[in-house]
Image (cartoon, rainbow, N blue to C red):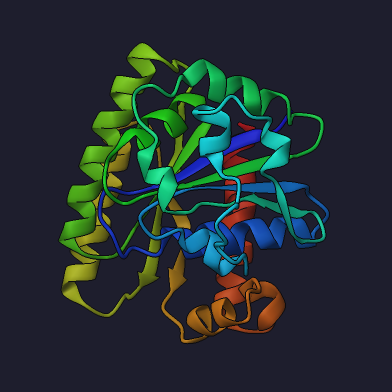
Amino acid sequence: MAKIITYINEKGGVGKTSVCFNSAWYLAENGERVLMIDMDGQKANLTFFAGIDQYDNLKTMVHVLKHDGDITETVLEVTANLDIVPATAEVSSIGMESKVSKFRKALKSLDDFYDYIFIDVSPTPNWSHYLSLSVSDFAVVVMLPDLASLEGNKGVFETVEEITETTNPNLKIAGILMNKAVSRTVLAKQVLEMAEEMAQENNTRVFDTKIRNAVVLSENISNNEGVTSYSPKSPASDDVRDFVKELEKAVAE
């Protein structure tokens, strides 16, 4: 059965799409079958990272949720073991008429094909957040070591609480991931402490792994390649590998 994980924050620019892409790529490198779903119609960065051209007839989750299409008709291959359901601007039109049950049924039909399904949502809270969390087993909250990201976390936790009380009682937060981490500043240390307190209050954790800021995490995207393949010996690749190992353990508990 595929584990469904949404990468989320309510603050833009935290690098959650990069984390989602690199994590999926690394799992696929290691023989896991992974599907990425781009639910960010504002930017469709995950689609861009995967090297998918946004041509006019590209089928997205709109094909499934608004037009009752078969989800397999939307799936495109990225590399060995790694596929994507892409996004275009039309994904922003997904709204309340899209049923959770329809999304859940579509993903259930893929259970035999994938080990993991990663969903990337827009930074702005909208129906993609509601739908994605409603069908997910876990959420990964990605943040920067700053106060704005911390505020974005609060909104995510409130949304998760609402979802668990309504449409998805089994949803759990796998953890909070510190991205583009620095350890030398007083502010970064303070934000980490506050994030750990927030995690404890919400029965989750801050991942031990902190993904450090690195130029290579921008370079690999221009090659439409995961960092662990593009620069396997870099510290950034080590961070991604360590995070994925923690994530695998967290979602297996």
The answer to whether any part of residue 209 appears in the image is no
Q: Quadrant of the N terminus?
A: top right
How many numbered markers are drawn? 0
Residue in the image at 55% along x and 20% along y:
102
Residue 204 in view of the camera: yes
Where is the C terminus found, in terms of image quarters? top right
Q: In which quarter of the image is residue 94?
A: top left
Residue 20: x %, y % from top left: 53, 56
Q: Which residue is drawn at 29% across and 38% down?
A: 126
Nearer to the camera, 122 or 238: 122
Image coordinates for residue 223, horizontal then vertical, percent? 63, 81
Q: Residue 2's quadrant in the figure?
A: top right
Say above or below: 28 vs 202.
Answer: below
Viewer-side residue, 137 vs 177: 137
Residue 204 vertical placement versus 57 (above, below): above
At which x and y percent is residue 160? 34, 29
The residue lying at 46 percent from left, 19 percent from top is 99
- Whether 84 is drawn above or below 115: the answer is below
Indicate whether 37 appears above or below 133: below
Q: Nearer the viewer, residue 93 or 191?
A: 93
Instruction: State the residue lying farthest toward the front.
Output: 56
Q: Which residue is located at x 57 percent, y 52 percent?
A: 86
Q: Position of residue 35 (x, y in %)?
A: 67, 46
